[in-house]
Image (cartoon, rainbow, N blue to C red):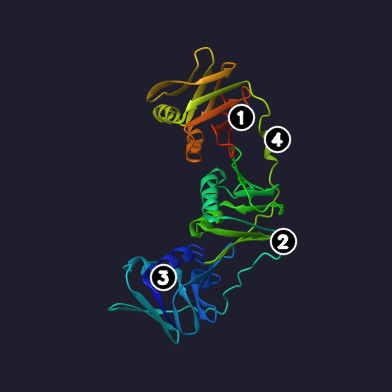
């Protein structure tokens, strides 16, 4: 192999691809490597940890064909140390690869690549939709945090994707809070649903381009196909809970509050929250105000009252303050709406004017 690539192109490709390699593989060392392929299809980089995989195209000059596998960690360190101007040359001699950059030259021992696995691709070509990569990235990075960090229930550590009636609906929950986000699609014929592990979705989101991406899926894996390459994830084989059953159909009180007032008051109150991170919220329709209260026996207590447009009945509920503040990263609306169905029932938070997002938080014991 002998190839010539711009340093910036090389560094960006390594950054995207290396995250798909196994961080430490004792059973199959090649999984901790990046495969570089030079041939009739140009220059490519591949990596997989058997959960996710990537096949990325690079712009560059292929002087001689070849295939090599190099430690992903070593490649990341080299890419991170490169300046962004000029080219690098990668040339193979036996089981040694040389990377030449300006006056510098690195000699790296390659990894045997014969055991590098094939990256699977969904078999059902009918399950395909097209959407902007920037929308998909924002979708994954915003709601993935609402999924469970535990793998005891794999369905809860996944993002549920449903495609129906020209709308893609994504849901994530850890059983304490839930986020549902809807995105309209241009192609309305495709229908289907799948579960993608949240950690896989985040890795893919970091590598996706902003322009059009084709999403293809079957019962076992999904692929995200762009002009620059293919990103694949295995799917979670589990049944997602019927989350719609826990969304209250009616409410007894609603408050509309300026986002900045809500955020600032909550931030000040949480300083005094207890070891359970509990804060109490109160709806007061008579005075048209909304208040936070927190008490810590070791520090003291704090209450914050803010103006709100409230309709319905007075109500007090307690919540983990982290779950309340998490909503603020999901919307850019200047005002937010909070609706509650009663004591012990979940709170629903939405951005005013944003019909695409629903956020639900379960209350704590009073």
Marks 1/3: CA–CA distance? 49 Å
Question: Which of disc 2 and disc 4 is earlier in sequence?
Answer: 2
Residue visible at 49% across and 26% down in the picture:
257
Picture coordinates of residue 13, whole percent (x, y): 45, 67
Marks 3/4: CA–CA distance? 49 Å
Picture coordinates of residue 267, whole percent (x, y): 41, 31
Picture coordinates of residue 223, whole percent (x, y): 61, 62
Could you say whether the residue bearing mark 4 is in a helix, strand or loop? Answer: helix
User: Residue 308: which numbered mark, if any?
Assistant: none
Could you say whether the residue bearing mark 2 is in a helix, strand or loop? Answer: loop
Residue to which mark 2 is pinned: 126
Marks 1/2: CA–CA distance? 38 Å
Residue to which mark 3 is pinned: 10
Picture coordinates of residue 58, whole percent (x, y): 47, 72
User: Residue 346: which numbered mark, if any?
Assistant: 1
User: Residue 245: which numbered mark, if any?
Assistant: 4
């Amino acid at each position: 192999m002998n190839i010539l690539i711009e340093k910036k192109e090389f560094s960006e490709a390594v950054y995207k691809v290396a995250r798909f390699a196994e961080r430490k593989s004792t059973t199959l060392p090649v999984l901790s490597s990046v495969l570089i392929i030079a041939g009739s299809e140009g220059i490519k980089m591949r990596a997989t940890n058997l959960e996710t995989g990537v096949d990325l195209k690079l712009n560059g000059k292929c002087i001689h064909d070849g295939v090599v596998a190099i430690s992903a960690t070593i490649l990341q360190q080299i890419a991170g140390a490169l300046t962004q101007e000029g080219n690098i040359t990668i040339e193979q001699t036996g089981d040694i690869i040389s990377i030449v950059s300006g006056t510098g030259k690195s000699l790296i021992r390659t990894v045997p690549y014969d055991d590098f696995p094939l990256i699977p691709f969904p078999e059902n070509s009918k399950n395909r939709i097209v959407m902007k990569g920037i929308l998909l990235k924002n979708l994954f990075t915003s709601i993935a945090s609402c999924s469970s960090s535990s793998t005891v229930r794999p369905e809860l550590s996944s993002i549920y994707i449903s495609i129906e009636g020209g709308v893609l609906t994504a849901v994530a929950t850890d059983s304490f809070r839930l986020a549902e986000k809807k995105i309209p699609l241009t192609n309305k014929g495709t229908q289907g649903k799948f579960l993608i592990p949240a950690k896989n979705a985040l890795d893919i989101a970091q590598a996706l381009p902003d322009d059009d991406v084709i999403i293809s899926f079957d019962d076992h894996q999904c692929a995200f196909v762009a002009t620059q390459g293919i990103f694949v994830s295995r799917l979670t084989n589990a049944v997602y809970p019927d989350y719609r059953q826990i969304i209250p159909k009616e409410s007894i009180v609603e408050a509309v509050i300026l986002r900045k007032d809500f955020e600032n008051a909550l931030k000040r109150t949480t300083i005094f929250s207890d070891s359970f991170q509990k804060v109490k919220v109160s709806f007061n329709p008579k005075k048209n105000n909304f208040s936070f209260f927190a008490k810590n026996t070791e520090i003291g207590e704090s209450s914050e009252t803010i103006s709100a447009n409230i309709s319905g009945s007075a109500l007090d509920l307690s919540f983990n303050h982290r779950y309340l503040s998490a909503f603020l990263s999901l919307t850019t609306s200047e005002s937010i709406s909070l609706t509650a169905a009663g004591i012990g029932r979940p709170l629903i938070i939405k951005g005013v004017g944003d019909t695409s997002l629903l956020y639900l938080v379960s209350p704590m014991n009073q």
